[in-house]
Image (cartoon, grey):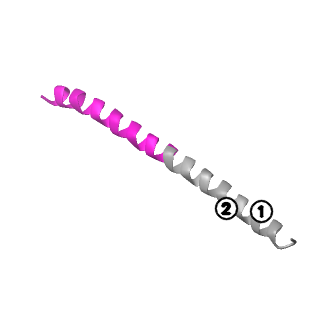
Amino acid sequence: MTMTSPILATAFVAAVAAVLAMRAAVVAASRKSMVKVRSRRRQPTNMKTQG
């Protein structure tokens, strides 16, 4: 019984780390998509000023 508690604690810590990593990946992906949307919006204005 003494071996199960460290194993469960390690599994719990690994699960929490995985959840935090997934959240960080989602935040990074949303930031990249926002940058793409902003760059798409800026391109037509730049083309209008150039042309």
> Residue 27 location in percent, x, y?
51, 43
28 vs 22, nearest the viewer: 22
Q: Is residue 2 shown above or below 12?
A: below
> Residue 42 location in percent, x, y?
29, 31
Does the magenta-highlighted stretch encompass residue 41?
A: yes
Which residue is label 1 attached to? 9
The span shown in magenta is: 27-51
Q: Is residue 47 shown above or below 23?
A: above
Residue at disc 2, secondary structure: helix
Marking on residue 14: 2
SS majority, magenta: helix
Residue at disc 1, secondary structure: helix
Instruction: Please report the residue visible at 80 percent of the width from the left and 69 percent of the height from the top.
Output: 4
Q: Quadrant of residue 48?
A: top left
Q: How many marks?
A: 2
26 vs 7, nearest the viewer: 7
Q: Amino acid at mark 2?
A: Ala
| Marks 1 and 2 close (CB-CB < 8 Å) | no
Instruction: Please report the residue visible at 45 percent of the width from the left and 40 percent of the height from the top.
Output: 30
Instruction: Please report the residue visible at 87 percent of the width from the left and 72 percent of the height from the top.
Output: 2
12 vs 21, nearest the viewer: 12
Question: In this image, 12 relative to 44: left or right?
Answer: right
Marking on residue 40: none
> Residue 14 location in percent, x, y?
67, 61
Q: Amino acid at mark 1?
A: Ala
Q: Earlier in the sequence, mark 1 or mark 2?
A: 1
Question: In this image, 48 relative to 9: left or right?
Answer: left
> Residue 16 location in percent, x, y?
67, 54
Q: Quadrant of residue 51?
A: top left
